[in-house]
Each structure stands twice: as structure tokens, then as C-alpha cells.
Image (tube, rainbow, N blue to C red):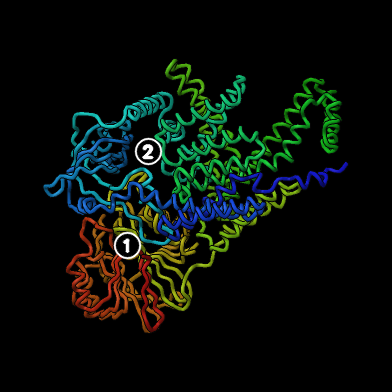
């Protein structure tokens, strides 16, 4: 029997455009958004072009030139997308162009009257520090005696510090919410603060923090002591928002009754998206294993809720349309209660469109349903295309609908069909020969089992084992397809090759699919009967502990000394990214072919391997390079030798007390820049001195780039230094103490240690600027003087030695304590670079320092205004570049 369709049927096969019109339309729309982002044109141009192309498409359609008409129609859709993107403008960020807004964010302090739009649980940190982050919307700003009735969003950080050690110790035992006053949705407050505009770090590969906040309608930041916030009478906001806030607060309280400690924190994160109490190390473990989606409310949660609701409603024999509408309503309500962040809203919208389209197409074209969902979201929010969460969601859904389901339909689903009506030999006549043979083989096995177990029990056991085995195979294959398909976005956004993602997700996603309904049931039951609710809550707790154990075990799995559970990779080259996208498209196309499963999976595997291979570092050969990375108010310098050896000097860091959830400059900024440059491993790292803005990010850098050596000068015995040495020990990094006048060859460059003096005595338990390890790097007739934060005393001794240099790294971020005239006269640099934070509170760099540099005819570059600054010394000349 031939399975090939007759020629007449082949000729009647619909064209790609007829089978997947909405998928093609969504691709065209996305292409137009990309073009508009790269190429701005006046809106009238886009309108005229779209109208002309649509008229041309109609002309060709009337003359039955369908392909030409289709191409013109798709280009017209792309132009409409470009117009839509440009007309949406900047959203809340448009206020940044208001001169008044710029004025009030430049003032030392302004008086803000606002109301709370997003409340949060206060968090008790170590050492008696408590903090809380809330969002407020302004009503009135008073600056320099003038009132501005401006309305915009502020992310407000409230903090409190307990005085003595006994208070700090007591605070650590308090329930979340006790150390800081709770501010609720709609409350009026007034406070004095210095407003600052969010700013992206000026480095290649930097996270778009400003755009991230813009999506949440936040355009300014502020920090205020909790005791300085004044509560005012009255309420602002919507009644619906107040109801949501009250429901959410009530649910969090019930979670606190059903679970305790870390379990309650994890349940709050998994069910409602409140991650404030989740242990930082456990969060890293979930990230390392590719299971972080378990901890956040995003597409997975919405999908599990939709599947559970739809299954229960269909089990109750509710009609398909009614069940679909009720499911969509339930998902919308859940997204609303979880505070409807943009990724959740987009996931819910895509799910709703997908479910409705799936009904219309009667499951004939899952790809068309995916295209409709993507098109709906992009029309509504065109900037979503450039958001990582949308891309991850879309790729996941497309991989399931376009690759996994077609493969299942020709493999496991056929075998599942063969298990139906197993005792009926008449049903064999309706099946293909290979499935009939499969049924015959099972019947022979059943006859043997029946002798031992009886016919009924043997059949139940045999068919049950077959169904479980097929479900397990589907789950493993689905996890593999998703992990391979997401290899490129994971490498681009998170710089992770989740080698253990397939087994972890194959194990924890089924557990999570059981855990969520159990936890949700317990939460709802707690409003009726708390003791009864503890039964499903206990079952959910057991599943949670098993999930944690799996994640923690595989996150720290090493194979021959390689951390398989946490492989970090550099940003792939453009050619590799093009290869990965082409492989994904090829996999979607071939998965629908008769024998396309193997080539489809092979294409995904090859692309994933290529993405994970370390790229060639982006460097200039035969030149000594120094890049001052923009880390805000701190220092981090990348030195690349003429032969390609890499040395990172300092790693930035935030000033202030440490605590879970604080922004890690080393992970989020320094590491991201290095990966964007194609750096996968560092030869050495050096710490100039142990101040927070130099040492803060070093542990993350050591963990991510496994340097061979750590260079230190005289460092005091402080907690940050001890933690750094512990990290170096764990990663087997050789710690080398550098000393005055030491000289070494570093990949074709000469490095000489110039300070501090040999008899330098550190202050017990406290780092000082003059502890700084001062170095001079030379190549040919060109050289760089690297001062760290050295001040006047050290500079006096440096000037006495007369260390001439072409490039000067200005000490202490341009503070008046450094860059003395005698040093400039001795060094006589042609260029200088200052690393400082944008509009920092220290007013670095100081005007007098800039004046000294200008008087000495030194060309000065600054990271606070120019972003990352790179210098190339070829042995004869010095050349400078800035990122923007």
C-alpha cells in the first residue's frame, strides 16, 4: 500500500500563504518593526508607500498574479508596522523631553507629593538594614520655591537602619513588614528627595534598564529614609486597583498561614510573583539550570492555569466555546491579580488569541494560531518585539507548535492511537500496517503476562506502562526541543548555556504542573477551612522540596572540574546568530515532512552547539588596549595585551550595605560587557583596593570568567576581602601579592608596579584610597599610568619618579584629592580617562580637576557622559574611541 497522495491531491495542496496567512503576516509585521527601528522616516512616507503597495497588490490580484500580489501585500504590512512603531512614540519617556522635568531631576532636593501605585513587602537584610521598593505617581513637585503639577511614575526606595547591634539582631527576627511602615495602594505621601533619571550603562551589550522601567511607566528614581516619608489624608487611584491590592495582600497573608519561612517565600514567588523573600543563592540555582521560569509569573504559569481550567471544564462537558471563554477570563483575572506586568499581559494576550484562533481553525493549523497571537500582540504593543520576554515566549510557542507537535503527530500520537480499542481486532483494519504490527506484538506480550497476573490486570499494567513511557518520551523530547530552540536567546540575553536544562525541565515542569494546582487549591480552600487547606498545601510542599533538591543538585554539578550546571558563554558572532535562526526555520519546515523529525532535531542541535562555542574575542591585534567600562560611580578597566592576554582591573560595585537582591555590577554590567566583547575567560584580575566601588563586582567576575590569577596589593582584613579570597579559593584562582617595583611581561606588554610604598601599613579593618595598587603598562614607546584611587601623598611619590605616560587613568573618579599639578607635570599625558557616575552625589569629576587637565592640554574622556572609553596604543601612537 502506497502512502503517497495521488497527483490530483498533490496539486490541490494549498500554498504556504493559504495555509499560514497570519503567520506570514506576523513575520512581515515584525520585519517592518525592525526596519523602522533602524531607519526612521517621516510618517507620511510610510503612509504613501503602504497605500501605493496595497493598490499595486490589488492590481496584480485582479490579473491572477497571486505571488506578486502576496509579496506586495506583505511589504505593505511591514510598512504599516513601521508607521505604527513611530506613531507610538516614547510612551512615558516622552516626559524626559520636558525642560521642567530635566530641571527637577537636576535639583539637589525637591518636595514630592504623590500616591502609591504599587506596594511591596518590606525586606529585612543582614546587619539591621531594612528596605522596601514601591512605585508612586506624582501629583505635585516643588523645586526651588516653584510648584510643578506634573504626573509621572517614580520608583521609590525606602530604607531604615537600626542603631545598635541588639536592635539589628532583633530586627533580623521580625516578620517581613515590621521594620518599615507598610504603604498601601492609593495612599497619599509627601517626601523630600533628589530625583534622578534612570540611565543605561554606556557599554556595548548593556541592559536597557531605562526601557525596562518605561514599560512600567517609571521615569524617575529616588531613595528616602522611611522616617522622612509623611503620610497624607485621602485616597488616589482606581477602585479596581484598590480591590486588586487588597486581594493580593489577603492572598499573601494566607500563604504565610499555610507555609513558613523559605517555603512561604517560594510559594509567594511562584503563585503571585513576589520574589522579595526568596533566597538569593537559590534564585541563582534556578537561573543556572534554566528553571528560573518556575520562580516568576510568566507564560508558563498562565499556560498551566489555562490547561488546568480547560481540562476541568471539558471534563465537566462544557461546550468548547464556553470552556475557552471561561479559561481566558480566568487567565485575565490571574494576570490582573499578579499585577499585570508586561510579560504576563503579553503571555495572556497571546494565549487568548491562540485559543480563539485554535477554535476557528479546528486545530488544522497551529502555526497560524501562533501567527495570529503574535500579530495581535505586536499590533497592540509594537515595542514588545524588542523585549526579551516576548521573544522567549514566541520562540517557545513556535517551537512547540511548529516542531514538537508535528513530530508527536507522526510518532507518539500514532502509537497512542494504536492503544485505543486494544481488544478489538476490527479496529486493526483502520490502522496502517506498522501500527497493526505494534498491536500484535503487544498482544503476544500480553498473553505471557496474563499467565502470571490474569488478563485484566496484565492488560491494565501493560497499556498503562506504554502510555506512561510515551508521555515520558514526549516530555523529554519537548524539553529538548525547547532548550535547543532557546539556545540563541539564552546566549544573547543571559549568556548561559543551560547544559542541564533538558533533564531539569523534564523533571521539574511536571512537578510544577502538579504543584501549582495543589497550591492554588490550598490557597482557595484556606478561605473556607484552613485545616482542610493544609492537606493539599502539604502535598505542594513535598513537591516543592523535591523540585528544590533537583535544581540545587544539578546547579552545582561539575564534570571533570567544569561547572556543567552553570556554563556562561560570550555573545555569539553575527554569523552564528544567522545560522541559528536559519536552523530554526529549517527545523519548523522539515518537522512537517514525512521523514523530517531527524533532520529537524539535528538542525536544532547543530545550531545550539554552534551558539555555545566560544567566539573569537573582539580585539585589535598588535596593540595594547585599555577600556574604561561604564560602571557608574566606580572603576573597572579591561586591559588587553598585544598578544591577546586579558587583565581586568577592578569590577565596580554599589556603595552601601550588602543585601539580597541588590544590583550586582559584576554580573549585570562588567560581565555583560566582557561577553559582548567575546571574552569567555580572563587571564588575570587585579584589585587596586577594597572599597565597595572597586571590589563589589569582583566575585561575580571570578565566578563567570575563571581567571588564572588574582593580583592584590596590601589589603586590610575586611569582610569583602575575605569573601573575595574565599571565591578565589573555590574557583582555584592563584592569589598573587604584587609589590613595589615588580616588573612582569604580560602578553607582549610590560607591567610595572609603582605603588603603594614597600613600607605601607594598612588601617586595621578599613580600606583606604592610598592602599591602591598603582601600575604602569607599556608597549613600545607608549604607556598607561593606572592610579586606582591614589591621593595626594602617593601622587607626590609618583611624581618624584617621573613616570611619563601617554594615557592617564585619573585617580579617584576626578576627586579634588588627586590629579595634582605636580603629577600632571611629571607624567605629561596626552589623554586621560575618568570613570564616574552620571550626576553622582560626590560631584565627580570636580571642576578644578577638569581645569587642571585642560590647562595641561590633556584630552579627557569620561564614562559618565561618553560611556565606555577605549584606547589603543600601538607602540607609537595612542588612539581613542567612545561607545556613544
As rendered, which of 247 and 45 lies closer to the eye?
A: 45
Frontmost residue, 738 versus 40:
40
Residue 417 appears in view: yes
Give the residue number, with chain letter if any, for mark 1: 635
Q: Residue 469's spot in the image, x, y percent?
A: 71, 35
Residue 495, visible in the rendered structure:
no
* Residue for point 44% across, 15% down: 529
Q: Is residue 738 above or below residue 86?
A: below
Q: Secondary structure at mark 2?
A: loop
**Distance Cα–Cα, label 1 vs label 2:** 29 Å
Q: Nearer the viewer, residue 116 or 53?
A: 53
* Image disc number at residue 276: 2
Quadrant position of residue 474: top right
Percent across and percent down for residue 399 are: 61, 45
| Residue 627 in which image quadrant | bottom left
Q: Position of residue 606 (x, y in %)?
A: 64, 56
Horizontal relation, residue 683 to residue 839: left or right: right
The residue positioned 26% from the left and 71% from the top of the image is 757
Say which quadrant the C terminus sits in.
Answer: bottom left
- Is the N terminus in the top left, top right, bottom left or bottom right quadrant? top right
839 or 240, nearer to the observer? 240
Question: Where residue 233 sits: x, y (%)?
Answer: 19, 29
Please rate how many residues cluster around mark 1, counting C-alpha atoms within 10 Å: few if below 14, some from 14 to 19, many from 20.
many
User: Callout 1: helix, strand or loop?
Assistant: loop
Amino acid at each position: 500500500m502506497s502512502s503517497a497522495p495521488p497527483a490530483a491531491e498533490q496539486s490541490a495542496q494549498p500554498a504556504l500563504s493559504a495555509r499560514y496567512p497570519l503567520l506570514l503576516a506576523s513575520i512581515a509585521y515584525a520585519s517592518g518593526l525592525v526596519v523602522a527601528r533602524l531607519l526612521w522616516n517621516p510618517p507620511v512616507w510610510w503612509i504613501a508607500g503602504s497605500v501605493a503597495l496595497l493598490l499595486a497588490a490589488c492590481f496584480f490580484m485582479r490579473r491572477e498574479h497571486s505571488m506578486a500580489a502576496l509579496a506586495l501585500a506583505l511589504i505593505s504590512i511591514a510598512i504599516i508596522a513601521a508607521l505604527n512603531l513611530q506613531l507610538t512614540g516614547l510612551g512615558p519617556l516622552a516626559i524626559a523631553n520636558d525642560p521642567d522635568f530635566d530641571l527637577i531631576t537636576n535639583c539637589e532636593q525637591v518636595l514630592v507629593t504623590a500616591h502609591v501605585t504599587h506596594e511591596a513587602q518590606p525586606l529585612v537584610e543582614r546587619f539591621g538594614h531594612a528596605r522596601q521598593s514601591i512605585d508612586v505617581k506624582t501629583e505635585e513637585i516643588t523645586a526651588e520655591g516653584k510648584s510643578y503639577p506634573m504626573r509621572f511614575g517614580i520608583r521609590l526606595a525606602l530604607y531604615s537602619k537600626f542603631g545598635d547591634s541588639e536592635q539589628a539582631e532583633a530586627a533580623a527576627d521580625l516578620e517581613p513588614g515590621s521594620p518599615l511602615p507598610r504603604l498601601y495602594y492609593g495612599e497619599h505621601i509627601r517626601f523630600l528627595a533628589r530625583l534622578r533619571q534612570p540611565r543605561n550603562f554606556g557599554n556595548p551589550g548593556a541592559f536597557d534598564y531605562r526601557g525596562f522601567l518605561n514599560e512600567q511607566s517609571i521615569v524617575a528614581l529616588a531613595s528616602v529614609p522611611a522616617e522622612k516619608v509623611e503620610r497624607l489624608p485621602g485616597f488616589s487611584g482606581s477602585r479596581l486597583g484598590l480591590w486588586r491590592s487588597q486581594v493580593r495582600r489577603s492572598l499573601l497573608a494566607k500563604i504565610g498561614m499555610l507555609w513558613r519561612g523559605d517555603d512561604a517565600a517560594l510559594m509567594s514567588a511562584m503563585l503571585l510573583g513576589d520574589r522579595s523573600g526568596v533566597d538569593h543563592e537559590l534564585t541563582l540555582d534556578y537561573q543556572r539550570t534554566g528553571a528560573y521560569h518556575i520562580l516568576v509569573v510568566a507564560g508558563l504559569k498562565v499556560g498551566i492555569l489555562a490547561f488546568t481550567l480547560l481540562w476541568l471544564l471539558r471534563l465537566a462537558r462544557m461546550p468548547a466555546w464556553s470552556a475557552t471563554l471561561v479559561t481566558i477570563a480566568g487567565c485575565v483575572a490571574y494576570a490582573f491579580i499578579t499585577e499585570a506586568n508586561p510579560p504576563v499581559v503579553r503571555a495572556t494576550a497571546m494565549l487568548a488569541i491562540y485559543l480563539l484562533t485554535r477554535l476557528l481553525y479546528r486545530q488544522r493549523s497551529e502555526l497560524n494560531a501562533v501567527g495570529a497571537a503574535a500579530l495581535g500582540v505586536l499590533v497592540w504593543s509594537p515595542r514588545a518585539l524588542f523585549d526579551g520576554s516576548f521573544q522567549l515566549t514566541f520562540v517557545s510557542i513556535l517551537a512547540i507548535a511548529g516542531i514538537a507537535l508535528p513530530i508527536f503527530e507522526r510518532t507518539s500520537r500514532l502509537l497512542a492511537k494504536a492503544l485505543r480499542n486494544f481488544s478489538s481486532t476490527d479496529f486493526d483494519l483502520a490502522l496502517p500496517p506498522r501500527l497493526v504490527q505494534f498491536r500484535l506484538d503487544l498482544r503476544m506480550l500480553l498473553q505471557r503476562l496474563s499467565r502470571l497476573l490474569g488478563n485484566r490486570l496484565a492488560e491494565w499494567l501493560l497499556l498503562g506502562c506504554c502510555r506512561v513511557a510515551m508521555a515520558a518520551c514526549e516530555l523529554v523530547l519537548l524539553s529538548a526541543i525547547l532548550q535547543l530552540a532557546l539556545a540563541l536567546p539564552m546566549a544573547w540575553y543571559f549568556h548561559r548555556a543551560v547544559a542541564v536544562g533538558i533533564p531539569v525541565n523534564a523533571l521539574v515542569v511536571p512537578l510544577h504542573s502538579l504543584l501549582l494546582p495543589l497550591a492554588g487549591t490550598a490557597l482557595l480552600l484556606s478561605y473556607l477551612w484552613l485545616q482542610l487547606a493544609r492537606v493539599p498545601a502539604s502535598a505542594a510542599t513535598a513537591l516543592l522540596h523535591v523540585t528544590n533538591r533537583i535544581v540545587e543538585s544539578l546547579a552545582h554539578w561539575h564534570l571533570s572540574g567544569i561547572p556543567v550546571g552553570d556554563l556562561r558563554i560570550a555573545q555569539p558572532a553575527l554569523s552564528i546568530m544567522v545560522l541559528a535562526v536559519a536552523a530554526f526555520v529549517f527545523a519548523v519546515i522539515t518537522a512537517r515532512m514525512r521523514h523530517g523529525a531527524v533532520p529537524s532535531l539535528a538542525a536544532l542541535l547543530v545550531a545550539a552547539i554552534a551558539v555555545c562555542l566560544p567566539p573569537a574575542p573582539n580585539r585589535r591585534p598588535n596593540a595594547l588596549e585599555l577600556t574604561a567600562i561604564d560602571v557608574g560611580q566606580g572603576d573597572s578597566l579591561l586591559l588587553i595585551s598585544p598578544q591577546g592576554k586579558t587583565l581586568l582591573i577592578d569590577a565596580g560595585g554599589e556603595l552601601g550595605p550588602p543585601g539580597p537582591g541588590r544590583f550586582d555590577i559584576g554580573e549585570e554590567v562588567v560581565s555583560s560587557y566582557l561577553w559582548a566583547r567575546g571574552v569567555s575567560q580572563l587571564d588575570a584580575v587585579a584589585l587596586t583596593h577594597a572599597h565597595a566601588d572597586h571590589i563589589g563586582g569582583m566575585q561575580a567576575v571570578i565566578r563567570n570568567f575563571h581567571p588564572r590569577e588574582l593580583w592584590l596589593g596590601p589589603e586590610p582584613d575586611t569582610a569583602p576581602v575575605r569573601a573575595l579570597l574565599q571565591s578565589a579559593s573555590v574557583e582555584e584562582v592563584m592569589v598573587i601579592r604584587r609589590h613595589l617595583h615588580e616588573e612582569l611581561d604580560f602578553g607582549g606588554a610590560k607591567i610595572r608596579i609603582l605603588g603603594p610604598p614597600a613600607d605601607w601599613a594598612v588601617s586595621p579593618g578599613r580600606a583606604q584610597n592610598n592602599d591602591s595598587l598603582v601600575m604602569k603598562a607599556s608597549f613600545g614607546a607608549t604607556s598607561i599610568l593606572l592610579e586606582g584611587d591614589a591621593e595626594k601623598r602617593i601622587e607626590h611619590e609618583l611624581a618624584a619618579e617621573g613616570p611619563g605616560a601617554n594615557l592617564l587613568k585619573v585617580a579617584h573618579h576626578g576627586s579634588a584629592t588627586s590629579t595634582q599639578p605636580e603629577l600632571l607635570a611629571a607624567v605629561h599625558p596626552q589623554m586621560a580617562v575618568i570613570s564616574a557616575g552620571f550626576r553622582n552625589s560626590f560631584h565627580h569629576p570636580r571642576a578644578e580637576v577638569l581645569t587642571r587637565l585642560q590647562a595641561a592640554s590633556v584630552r579627557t574622556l569620561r564614562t559618565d557622559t561618553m560611556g565606555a572609553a577605549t584606547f589603543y596604543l600601538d607602540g607609537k601612537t595612542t588612539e581613542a574611541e567612545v561607545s556613544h
